[in-house]
Image (spheres, grey):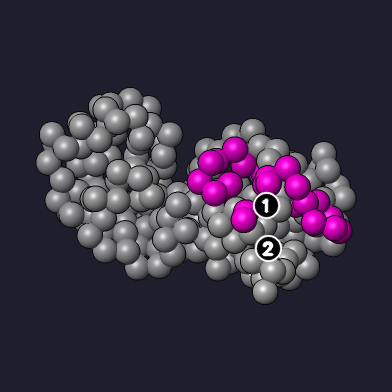
Amino acid sequence: MNPSPSQHASGPELILASASPRRRELLEQIGVRYRVQAAALDERQLPGELPGNCVQRLALAKAQHVHEQAPRALVLGADTAVVLDGLMLGKPADRAEHQRMMSALSGRSHQVLTAVALISAHGASVRLSESRVCFRTLSAAEALAYWDTGEPSDKAGGYAIQGRGAVFVAELHGSYSGVMGLPLFETAALLGEHGVSLGWKEQA
């Protein structure tokens, strides 16, 4: 049975600096106790900043923002970017922008970069997950129908691999959880370095 998000183990409390339901689900999947305290920051890419550097900076900034308010806690921050031809695709503002994104992604491969950062009283660590996703060719009609489901509106790149958007993915090379928004391999490694146990291991 997964632990409640409101519970935490003995020792430093773990705080997830994100309101993302996908990230909450992934932490619960590996049995980690935590609570949520979202960090509201300017998430725009800096001029000339490379996408990989951007997501790492933002993941650290989110964790740092919350850690300043809870200095005794462990704080986990994350940030995800969909990158096509070196350009970061944000969340579509409206149907027209979403259609442009889907047209650009159709029949091509793109990168998904997710950085995860963990800050404690002893310092900060960050890891970067890089995945490549290949879309099949999409028709304008199905892209419109997808927008009308409401799923893409708050997703970087305009799709959710764990939702209806999965039908567009022909190939995935890398981390499925990373594309969702929290790479579990890298996250578990960071948590282990800071003495956080995974719930299912405690029960073994």
Q: Residue 27: x and y, percent?
A: 60, 54
Relative to 80, residue 37 above or below: above
Q: Residue 146: x and y, percent?
A: 25, 35
Q: Mark 2 Cα within 10 Å, few/some/many (few <14, many 20+)?
A: some
Which residue is denoted by mark 2 in the rendering?
199
In depth, the one of 28 and 189 nearer the eye is 28
**Cβ atoms at labels 1 and 2 below 8 Å apart:** yes
- Residue at image point 27% right, 40% down: 101
- Residue 121 seen from this side: yes
Relative to 66, residue 56 above or below: below
Q: CA distance from mark 1 to mark 2?
A: 8 Å
Q: Quadrant of the N terminus?
A: bottom right
Q: Which residues are magenta?
A: 1-25
Which residue is denoted by mark 1 in the rendering?
3
Relative to 122, residue 76 above or below: above
> Which SS class for mark 1?
loop
